[in-house]
Image (spheres, helix red, strand yellow):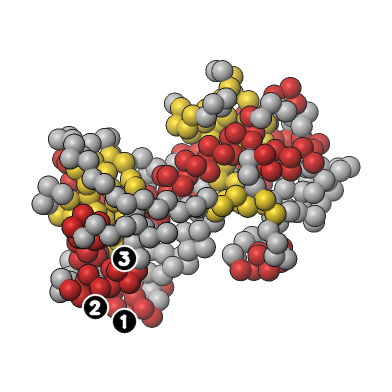
Amino acid sequence: MTVIAGTKVTLRRARDTDRARTYEWLIGSDLTANLMGAPMFPDRPIPALEEFSQSFPRHFYEGTRPYAGRMYVITVQGEEIGCISHGPIDVLNDVVELDIWLAERRVAGHGYGSESLVVLCDWLQTNYGVNRFLARPSRRNVKALRAMRRAGFRETDLPAQEVVAKLSLPAGRYADELLLFRILPVPSVVFRPDPGQTYVFIDSEFTNLTAPQLISVGAVATDATAFYAELEGWDVATASSFVHDTVIPLLDGDAVPKAMGAEALTEWLSERARKMPTTIISDSGFDRWALSELFGSEQLPPNVQWRRVPIAYEALDDVTQRLNLRRHHALDDARALRHLVLESAVPAAV
């Protein structure tokens, strides 16, 4: 099934049945010598299937943890010619690493790789709210560097070790790696609601920013309905001091199992979407992560899409105080977001 369409290429979500083939494209292609293995790349040995499966675990092929990584198959005129993947999406640092390889030399040099990188970046920004994309090729792979630069990736001016430390990146695979970034501007639009749609404003609370666990989800819709759920299964010991001091005291204390919360929110959203197209609005990529974490799926309910409308943090503070709402309670923060976007006509933050 096509998920992302470009001018030359389309991308579809890989399935578990694609694992063996994507592995063979990596280690058994006439392009493999340009990526790994002696004599050119003694620092990156060709991986065994077990090692490959550790680097690209099952959720890359099943979509159950989209913020933890996903594999896509590249198709050109009905022929599947390679694959592209993204690793874990670091919402806090707003960055995700991409990887790409083609099945054989004859499909290289036509711009397919460059376009695949471009359309995946654009799609990930629209659907998951990430704006910075990273590729880490070897300086020896001249063709890959050329393709990535055509896709808009550029080397950072900062020392590589400084960037790796600042973004908490894993160790690189090459001794001579380059850090290439493609940075997309944050959408800065004034939200104009469509009367033919229902809008759902959503907010979430979680344990910390670096390894979050979902605590609660709140939502308010333009049809005057609301949803709120506190969830079981998060570890209070991992909560930050801010969460201990500010979020936990506001909880109602009636938590439900995550599966029950997911079912209830799915039905509530679906009820709206059966009447008219429904768009979920949030001000942060963390809230889109929260939906994926709760549903355990990359898919939203049918006829439901997500959109980020970035709002200044201070504006949420101000409107929460004016409306006598509980700041950092998921339902009240959703109400504040709704007020700012619809009633106050506040332009989206840059």
Mark 2–mark 1 Cα distance, whole angstroms, equals: 7 Å
Instruction: Provide the residue designation for mark 1.
Output: 245
Q: Is residue 317 visible?
A: yes
Q: Are marks 2 and 1 in contact (CB under 8 Å)?
A: yes
Assess whether mark 3 and mark 2 are in contact (beta carbons under 8 angstroms).
no
Camera-side residue: 31 or 185? Answer: 185
Residue 39 found in image quarter: top right
Q: Amino acid at mark 3?
A: Glu
Q: Position of residue 225 (x, y in %)?
A: 12, 52
* Amino acid type, mark 2: Pro
| Point 45% across, 31% down: residue | 3
| Dot 2 or dot 3, earlier in sequence | 3
Badge 2 local density, few (<14 within 10 Å), some, or many (20+)? few
**Label 3 to label 1: alpha-carbon separation:** 13 Å
* Mark 3 secondary-structure assignment: strand
Question: What residue is shown with label 2?
Answer: 249
Q: With respect to residue 81, does 70 lie above or below?
A: below
Numbered disc 1: secondary structure:
helix
